[in-house]
Amino acid sequence: MKKKALIFGVTGQDGSYLSELLLKKNYDVIGVMRRTSAFNTARIDHLYKLYPDNFDTSYGDLSDLNSIERNIEKFGPEEIYNLAAQSHVGVSFEISDSTFDINAFGPLNILQALKKVGIKSKFYQACSSEMFGISPPPQNENTLFQPQSIYGVAKVSAYYTTRYFRQAFNMFAANGILFNHESPRRGLNFVTRKITVGIAKILTKEIDFLELGNLSARRDWGFAGDYVEAIWAILQQDKPDDFVISTGENYSIEDFVREAFSIVGLDWKKFVKSNVSRYLRPSEVPNLLGNSSKAIKQLKWKPKVLFKELCLMMVENDLKNFNLTLDEAKKIAKKL
Protein backbone atom coordinates (compact mmCIF):
# COMPACT_ATOMS: atom_id res chain seq x y z
CA MET A 1 0.00 0.00 0.00
CA LYS A 2 1.26 3.48 -0.85
CA LYS A 3 2.38 5.42 2.22
CA LYS A 4 1.82 9.06 3.06
CA ALA A 5 4.35 11.12 5.02
CA LEU A 6 3.95 14.48 6.74
CA ILE A 7 7.20 16.42 7.13
CA PHE A 8 7.53 19.39 9.47
CA GLY A 9 10.54 21.45 8.44
CA VAL A 10 10.30 20.47 4.77
CA THR A 11 12.06 23.59 3.47
CA GLY A 12 15.31 22.90 5.33
CA GLN A 13 18.34 20.88 4.29
CA ASP A 14 17.13 17.63 5.85
CA GLY A 15 13.53 18.17 4.81
CA SER A 16 14.47 18.48 1.16
CA TYR A 17 16.69 15.39 1.15
CA LEU A 18 14.13 13.33 3.07
CA SER A 19 11.37 14.41 0.67
CA GLU A 20 13.46 13.28 -2.29
CA LEU A 21 14.16 9.92 -0.65
CA LEU A 22 10.51 9.25 0.19
CA LEU A 23 9.26 10.32 -3.23
CA LYS A 24 11.72 7.92 -4.85
CA LYS A 25 10.22 5.24 -2.61
CA ASN A 26 6.77 6.08 -4.04
CA TYR A 27 5.43 7.91 -0.99
CA ASP A 28 2.98 10.77 -1.12
CA VAL A 29 4.77 13.59 0.72
CA ILE A 30 3.18 16.64 2.31
CA GLY A 31 5.53 19.24 3.67
CA VAL A 32 4.31 21.53 6.43
CA MET A 33 5.75 25.03 6.42
CA ARG A 34 5.08 28.33 8.14
CA ARG A 35 3.56 31.31 6.37
CA THR A 36 6.31 33.89 5.99
CA SER A 37 6.64 37.18 4.16
CA ALA A 38 9.51 35.78 2.07
CA PHE A 39 9.48 32.57 0.05
CA ASN A 40 12.02 30.06 1.39
CA THR A 41 11.23 27.08 -0.84
CA ALA A 42 14.42 27.06 -2.94
CA ARG A 43 15.46 23.62 -1.65
CA ILE A 44 12.15 21.99 -2.64
CA ASP A 45 10.97 23.93 -5.71
CA HIS A 46 12.24 21.17 -8.03
CA LEU A 47 10.05 18.60 -6.27
CA TYR A 48 6.82 20.32 -7.36
CA LYS A 49 7.94 19.84 -10.96
CA LEU A 50 9.35 16.34 -10.66
CA TYR A 51 6.52 14.91 -8.56
CA PRO A 52 3.40 17.01 -9.26
CA ASP A 53 1.03 14.22 -8.18
CA ASN A 54 2.95 13.07 -5.12
CA PHE A 55 4.42 16.18 -3.49
CA ASP A 56 2.59 19.12 -1.95
CA THR A 57 2.92 21.58 0.91
CA SER A 58 0.53 22.80 3.55
CA TYR A 59 0.71 25.68 5.98
CA GLY A 60 1.18 25.01 9.66
CA ASP A 61 3.13 26.21 12.66
CA LEU A 62 4.65 24.23 15.53
CA SER A 63 3.42 26.88 17.97
CA ASP A 64 -0.18 26.48 16.74
CA LEU A 65 -1.70 23.25 18.04
CA ASN A 66 -4.85 23.71 15.96
CA SER A 67 -2.90 23.91 12.71
CA ILE A 68 -1.00 20.74 13.60
CA GLU A 69 -4.21 18.88 14.39
CA ARG A 70 -5.75 20.13 11.14
CA ASN A 71 -2.85 18.81 9.05
CA ILE A 72 -2.79 15.42 10.78
CA GLU A 73 -6.56 15.01 10.41
CA LYS A 74 -6.61 16.21 6.80
CA PHE A 75 -3.81 14.02 5.48
CA GLY A 76 -3.87 11.00 7.82
CA PRO A 77 -0.19 10.15 7.33
CA GLU A 78 1.36 6.80 8.16
CA GLU A 79 4.58 8.60 9.09
CA ILE A 80 5.30 12.02 10.64
CA TYR A 81 8.80 13.48 10.63
CA ASN A 82 9.59 16.50 12.79
CA LEU A 83 12.67 18.17 11.35
CA ALA A 84 11.50 21.70 12.12
CA ALA A 85 13.68 23.71 14.49
CA GLN A 86 15.62 26.85 15.18
CA SER A 87 18.66 24.95 14.01
CA HIS A 88 21.61 27.24 14.72
CA VAL A 89 23.37 26.66 18.05
CA GLY A 90 25.03 30.08 18.12
CA VAL A 91 21.77 31.90 17.48
CA SER A 92 20.15 30.09 20.42
CA PHE A 93 22.26 32.15 22.84
CA GLU A 94 20.64 35.31 21.44
CA ILE A 95 17.04 34.13 21.02
CA SER A 96 16.70 31.63 23.84
CA ASP A 97 12.93 31.95 24.33
CA SER A 98 11.94 31.32 20.73
CA THR A 99 14.53 28.56 20.37
CA PHE A 100 13.03 26.72 23.32
CA ASP A 101 9.47 27.33 22.10
CA ILE A 102 10.18 25.84 18.68
CA ASN A 103 12.60 23.07 19.62
CA ALA A 104 10.98 21.85 22.85
CA PHE A 105 7.30 22.78 22.74
CA GLY A 106 7.00 22.12 18.99
CA PRO A 107 7.50 18.35 19.31
CA LEU A 108 5.20 18.32 22.34
CA ASN A 109 2.46 19.97 20.28
CA ILE A 110 2.81 17.44 17.47
CA LEU A 111 2.62 14.50 19.86
CA GLN A 112 -0.35 16.00 21.71
CA ALA A 113 -2.12 16.58 18.40
CA LEU A 114 -1.35 13.06 17.22
CA LYS A 115 -2.69 11.58 20.45
CA LYS A 116 -5.85 13.71 20.25
CA VAL A 117 -6.58 12.91 16.60
CA GLY A 118 -6.12 9.24 17.42
CA ILE A 119 -4.50 7.86 14.28
CA LYS A 120 -1.60 5.41 14.51
CA SER A 121 1.06 7.44 12.73
CA LYS A 122 4.70 6.66 13.38
CA PHE A 123 6.55 9.73 14.69
CA TYR A 124 10.20 10.70 14.24
CA GLN A 125 11.87 13.45 16.28
CA ALA A 126 15.12 15.03 15.09
CA CYS A 127 17.55 15.30 17.99
CA SER A 128 21.14 16.49 18.01
CA SER A 129 24.65 15.59 19.15
CA GLU A 130 24.64 19.00 20.88
CA MET A 131 22.67 17.26 23.63
CA PHE A 132 25.88 15.48 24.69
CA GLY A 133 27.69 18.76 25.23
CA ILE A 134 30.81 18.23 27.33
CA SER A 135 30.41 14.47 27.80
CA PRO A 136 33.67 12.89 26.58
CA PRO A 137 33.69 11.10 23.22
CA PRO A 138 32.78 8.75 21.74
CA GLN A 139 29.10 9.39 22.44
CA ASN A 140 26.37 6.76 21.99
CA GLU A 141 22.78 6.17 23.08
CA ASN A 142 23.85 5.65 26.70
CA THR A 143 26.05 8.74 27.03
CA LEU A 144 25.04 11.34 29.62
CA PHE A 145 23.44 14.48 28.19
CA GLN A 146 25.35 17.63 29.27
CA PRO A 147 24.16 20.31 26.82
CA GLN A 148 25.98 23.65 26.71
CA SER A 149 23.37 25.78 24.91
CA ILE A 150 19.63 26.46 24.99
CA TYR A 151 19.52 24.69 21.64
CA GLY A 152 20.94 21.55 23.25
CA VAL A 153 18.73 21.87 26.34
CA ALA A 154 15.62 22.18 24.15
CA LYS A 155 16.61 19.12 22.13
CA VAL A 156 17.04 17.12 25.35
CA SER A 157 13.51 18.17 26.29
CA ALA A 158 12.22 17.03 22.89
CA TYR A 159 14.04 13.71 23.29
CA TYR A 160 12.45 12.95 26.65
CA THR A 161 9.04 14.19 25.51
CA THR A 162 9.18 11.70 22.64
CA ARG A 163 10.18 8.88 24.97
CA TYR A 164 7.41 9.83 27.41
CA PHE A 165 4.68 9.59 24.76
CA ARG A 166 6.15 6.28 23.60
CA GLN A 167 6.10 4.78 27.07
CA ALA A 168 2.95 6.37 28.50
CA PHE A 169 0.65 6.06 25.49
CA ASN A 170 2.20 3.18 23.54
CA MET A 171 2.89 5.43 20.56
CA PHE A 172 5.45 4.68 17.88
CA ALA A 173 7.65 7.67 18.71
CA ALA A 174 11.38 7.51 17.99
CA ASN A 175 14.40 9.81 18.26
CA GLY A 176 17.31 10.17 15.90
CA ILE A 177 20.36 11.74 17.56
CA LEU A 178 22.14 13.09 14.50
CA PHE A 179 25.68 14.37 14.57
CA ASN A 180 26.66 17.26 12.29
CA HIS A 181 25.53 16.60 8.75
CA GLU A 182 26.36 18.93 5.91
CA SER A 183 25.69 19.30 2.20
CA PRO A 184 25.57 21.86 -0.58
CA ARG A 185 22.12 22.73 0.81
CA ARG A 186 23.45 23.64 4.25
CA GLY A 187 22.47 27.13 5.43
CA LEU A 188 24.93 29.93 4.81
CA ASN A 189 25.19 30.70 8.54
CA PHE A 190 26.80 27.33 9.30
CA VAL A 191 30.58 27.21 9.51
CA THR A 192 31.07 24.62 6.77
CA ARG A 193 29.20 26.75 4.24
CA LYS A 194 30.96 29.89 5.49
CA ILE A 195 34.21 28.15 4.59
CA THR A 196 33.22 26.86 1.15
CA VAL A 197 31.46 30.08 0.14
CA GLY A 198 34.41 32.04 1.53
CA ILE A 199 36.78 30.19 -0.81
CA ALA A 200 34.66 31.16 -3.82
CA LYS A 201 34.52 34.78 -2.65
CA ILE A 202 38.29 34.92 -2.18
CA LEU A 203 38.86 33.54 -5.68
CA THR A 204 36.43 36.07 -7.21
CA LYS A 205 37.97 38.84 -5.07
CA GLU A 206 34.73 39.65 -3.28
CA ILE A 207 36.64 39.34 0.00
CA ASP A 208 40.34 39.41 0.90
CA PHE A 209 40.14 36.98 3.79
CA LEU A 210 37.72 34.78 5.73
CA GLU A 211 37.12 35.44 9.42
CA LEU A 212 36.17 32.51 11.63
CA GLY A 213 35.97 31.81 15.36
CA ASN A 214 37.34 28.86 17.32
CA LEU A 215 39.15 26.53 14.93
CA SER A 216 39.92 23.81 17.47
CA ALA A 217 36.37 22.51 18.02
CA ARG A 218 36.04 18.96 16.72
CA ARG A 219 32.93 17.59 15.03
CA ASP A 220 31.73 14.34 13.47
CA TRP A 221 30.67 15.54 10.00
CA GLY A 222 28.54 13.45 7.65
CA PHE A 223 26.45 13.99 4.53
CA ALA A 224 22.79 14.94 5.01
CA GLY A 225 21.76 12.81 2.02
CA ASP A 226 23.09 9.73 3.84
CA TYR A 227 21.54 10.65 7.16
CA VAL A 228 17.97 10.90 5.86
CA GLU A 229 18.25 7.23 4.89
CA ALA A 230 18.83 6.48 8.57
CA ILE A 231 15.91 8.72 9.53
CA TRP A 232 13.62 6.75 7.23
CA ALA A 233 14.97 3.42 8.49
CA ILE A 234 14.20 4.37 12.10
CA LEU A 235 10.47 4.46 11.28
CA GLN A 236 10.62 1.13 9.43
CA GLN A 237 11.50 -0.81 12.58
CA ASP A 238 8.99 -3.11 14.28
CA LYS A 239 9.38 -1.25 17.57
CA PRO A 240 10.22 2.42 18.24
CA ASP A 241 13.70 3.15 19.53
CA ASP A 242 16.38 5.85 19.65
CA PHE A 243 19.52 5.87 17.52
CA VAL A 244 22.77 7.80 17.24
CA ILE A 245 23.60 8.60 13.60
CA SER A 246 27.21 9.55 12.85
CA THR A 247 30.29 8.67 10.79
CA GLY A 248 32.50 7.62 13.69
CA GLU A 249 35.21 10.06 12.55
CA ASN A 250 35.80 13.60 13.75
CA TYR A 251 37.84 16.55 12.57
CA SER A 252 38.53 20.05 13.82
CA ILE A 253 37.21 23.14 12.09
CA GLU A 254 40.83 23.83 11.19
CA ASP A 255 40.94 20.41 9.49
CA PHE A 256 37.86 21.33 7.44
CA VAL A 257 39.41 24.67 6.48
CA ARG A 258 42.70 23.02 5.49
CA GLU A 259 41.01 20.34 3.38
CA ALA A 260 38.61 22.73 1.66
CA PHE A 261 41.30 25.29 0.79
CA SER A 262 43.66 22.56 -0.43
CA ILE A 263 41.06 21.40 -2.96
CA VAL A 264 41.55 24.64 -4.93
CA GLY A 265 45.24 24.93 -4.12
CA LEU A 266 45.12 27.80 -1.62
CA ASP A 267 47.22 28.07 1.53
CA TRP A 268 44.50 28.60 4.12
CA LYS A 269 46.85 30.35 6.55
CA LYS A 270 47.15 33.27 4.12
CA PHE A 271 43.41 33.81 3.86
CA VAL A 272 41.83 32.79 7.18
CA LYS A 273 41.81 34.84 10.37
CA SER A 274 40.61 33.44 13.67
CA ASN A 275 38.73 35.99 15.75
CA VAL A 276 37.78 33.93 18.78
CA SER A 277 36.58 36.92 20.84
CA ARG A 278 34.08 38.02 18.17
CA TYR A 279 32.46 34.60 17.93
CA LEU A 280 32.91 33.61 21.57
CA ARG A 281 29.95 31.72 23.06
CA PRO A 282 29.04 31.62 26.77
CA SER A 283 29.88 27.91 26.74
CA GLU A 284 31.50 25.68 24.15
CA VAL A 285 31.24 22.04 23.08
CA PRO A 286 34.82 20.98 22.33
CA ASN A 287 34.61 17.45 20.99
CA LEU A 288 31.78 15.44 19.42
CA LEU A 289 32.36 11.95 18.02
CA GLY A 290 29.53 9.50 17.50
CA ASN A 291 29.36 5.74 17.95
CA SER A 292 26.65 4.44 15.61
CA SER A 293 27.21 0.72 16.15
CA LYS A 294 23.56 0.28 17.18
CA ALA A 295 22.30 1.92 13.97
CA ILE A 296 24.76 -0.07 11.86
CA LYS A 297 23.55 -3.33 13.42
CA GLN A 298 19.81 -2.71 13.73
CA LEU A 299 19.08 -0.30 10.88
CA LYS A 300 21.60 -1.88 8.49
CA TRP A 301 22.78 1.68 7.82
CA LYS A 302 26.21 3.15 7.38
CA PRO A 303 27.49 6.45 5.95
CA LYS A 304 28.62 6.45 2.33
CA VAL A 305 30.10 9.95 2.02
CA LEU A 306 33.00 10.66 4.37
CA PHE A 307 35.00 13.77 5.20
CA LYS A 308 37.16 14.36 2.12
CA GLU A 309 34.35 13.61 -0.34
CA LEU A 310 31.99 15.84 1.63
CA CYS A 311 34.46 18.76 1.48
CA LEU A 312 34.95 18.29 -2.26
CA MET A 313 31.20 18.14 -2.89
CA MET A 314 30.59 21.38 -1.01
CA VAL A 315 33.54 23.27 -2.49
CA GLU A 316 32.60 22.31 -6.05
CA ASN A 317 28.99 23.34 -5.46
CA ASP A 318 29.90 26.80 -4.19
CA LEU A 319 32.41 27.33 -6.97
CA LYS A 320 29.60 26.51 -9.40
CA ASN A 321 27.38 29.06 -7.64
CA PHE A 322 30.06 31.64 -8.47
CA ASN A 323 30.34 30.40 -12.08
CA LEU A 324 33.69 28.70 -11.54
CA THR A 325 34.83 25.18 -12.36
CA LEU A 326 37.38 23.49 -10.12
CA ASP A 327 40.04 23.75 -12.84
CA GLU A 328 39.36 27.47 -13.23
CA ALA A 329 39.55 27.91 -9.47
CA LYS A 330 42.93 26.20 -9.31
CA LYS A 331 44.31 28.47 -12.04
CA ILE A 332 43.13 31.59 -10.19
CA ALA A 333 44.53 30.26 -6.90
CA LYS A 334 48.03 30.00 -8.40
CA LYS A 335 48.01 33.76 -8.99
CA LEU A 336 46.95 34.69 -5.45
Image: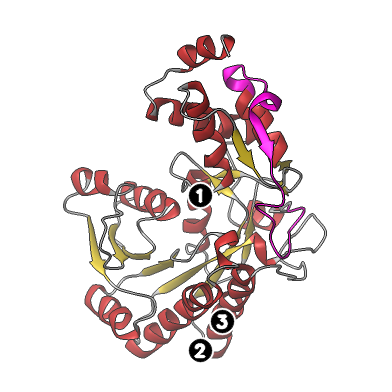
**Magenta highlight range:** 262-288
Residue 108, percent from left and from top: 48, 82
- Within 10 Å of disc 1 (Cα), the crowding (few <14, some 14-19, many 20+) is few
Is the stretch drawn in magenta largely helix, strand or loop? loop
Determine contact: label 2, label 1, CB under 8 Å. Answer: no
Q: Nearer the viewer, mark 2 or mark 1?
A: 1
Residue assigned mark 3: 161
Q: Earlier in the sequence, mark 3 or mark 2?
A: 3
Q: Is residue 321 above or below residue 94?
A: above
In the image, 62: left or right of 125? left
Q: At 73% across and 58% down in the image, what residue appears?
A: 285
Q: Earlier in the sequence, mark 3 or mark 1?
A: 3
Q: At 63% across and 44% down in the image, what residue appears?
A: 221
Residue assigned mark 2: 169
Q: Is residue 230 above or below residue 148?
A: above
Spatial separation of the CA atoms under disc 2 and disc 1: 39 Å
Q: Is residue 47 magenta?
A: no
Q: Is residue 257 above or below residue 114?
A: above
Q: Is residue 285 magenta?
A: yes
Q: What amino acid does circle 2 point to?
A: Phe
Q: Is residue 331 above or below residue 169?
A: above
Determine contact: label 3, label 2, CB under 8 Å. Answer: no
Q: At numbered mark 1, what does the secondary structure look like: helix, strand or loop? A: loop
Residue assigned mark 1: 189
- Within 10 Å of disc 3 (Cα), the crowding (few <14, some 14-19, many 20+) is some
In this orientation, which residue lies closer to the viewer: 150 or 16? 150
Q: At 78% across and 63% down in the image, what residue appears?
A: 134
Where on the picture, by quarter, is residue 204? top left
Q: What amino acid does circle 3 point to?
A: Thr
Q: Earlier in the sequence, mark 2 or mark 1?
A: 2
Toward the left, the furthest residue is 53
